[in-house]
Amino acid sequence: MADKTWGDLLDFIKGELPRDAVMGDDVYVRRVNLGIGVINERSGGFEDHWVNDGATGSLSLSGSVCTFPGDLLDARTIRWDGTELRFRTVDQMEALGPDWRTRSGTPSLFTLTARGLVLDSDPGDDEGSDLEIWGSGCIPELEFETDSLNPFAYLPTPHQMAPALYVLGYLPLYGRYREDVMAIQTDYRKQWDAFLAGVAWAVITRKYPRLSS
């Protein structure tokens, strides 16, 4: 089954709203991203790994500099061609050899930057799948760049429409009857809360598999 897209969620949202609830699509996008943030907070991130294979969502490696993708939260293990690299501070790198930023060769060390990492040498293979990072990631926000990730694909197929429940439950009040609108929104929020409870339980059973038996 194909993953849900923003078009699927937008059709659902607009189909649930009354005709007089006219809002720009950017309002829905902002609410979806708020909902994604709540999911990330409740789940605490997920275990994953990334490689420099040149595909969407992979690591961006240029020479010895790697820029982390938006869904990578915490890089814990760095490998090059299967061998784990050791961390060093910039000062330690400089002490080992001031040419570490420009030399070529197989990397053995790395240091972290605000946006990614720098290897201790340029391996000359930007998209060979040799650089591998294991750590924790998050669901990325909904964006519309050509290389953007699909945030809904990070959720199990039966729950990929769940962010739409957050949108419907937390939109600005619309329509002529405030009480009716609030009652409807309350129902959407209950469905959203039930989804979040399921996310929290899924995280627990993922970490402690015996609890699911």
Image (cartoon, grey):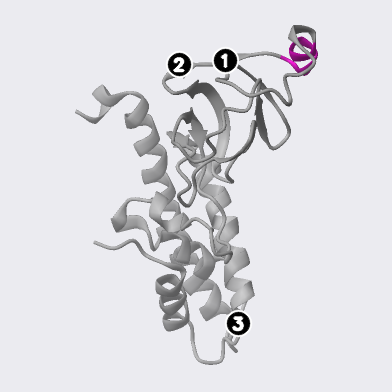
Q: Tell which of 190 and 93 is nearer to you.
A: 93
What residue appears at the point 58 percent right and 19 percent down from the top-left corner?
Answer: 107
* For residue 70, side relative to residue 51 (left or right): right
The relative height of residue 20 versus residue 62 in the rendered view (above or below) is below
Q: Earlier in the sequence, mark 3 or mark 1?
A: 1
Q: Given the image, on which type of amino acid does mark 1 rest? A: Ser
Residue 92 in magenta? yes
- The magenta segment is 89-94
Q: Position of residue 29 (x, y in %)?
A: 58, 68
Q: Position of residue 187 (x, y in %)?
A: 44, 66
Q: Position of residue 156 (x, y in %)?
A: 32, 51
The residue pinned by badge 2 equals 83
The residue pinned by badge 3 equals 174
Question: In terms of secondary structure, where does tag 1 sit?
Answer: loop
* For residue 177, side relative to residue 94 (left or right): left
What residue appears at the point 53 percent right and 58 percent down from the top-left corner?
Answer: 148
The relative height of residue 187 versus residue 209 in the rendered view (above or below) is below
Q: Nearer the viewer, mark 2 or mark 3?
A: 2
Question: In terms of secondary structure, where does tag 2 sit?
Answer: strand
Residue 207 in magenta? no
Q: Quadrant of the N terminus?
A: bottom left
Q: Residues within 10 Å of mark 2 (few under 14, many from 20)?
A: few
- Residue at far left of view: 213
Question: In terms of secondary structure, where does tag 3 sit?
Answer: loop
Q: Are marks 3 and 1 in contact (CB under 8 Å)?
A: no
Q: Quadrant of the C terminus?
A: top left
The residue pinned by badge 1 equals 108
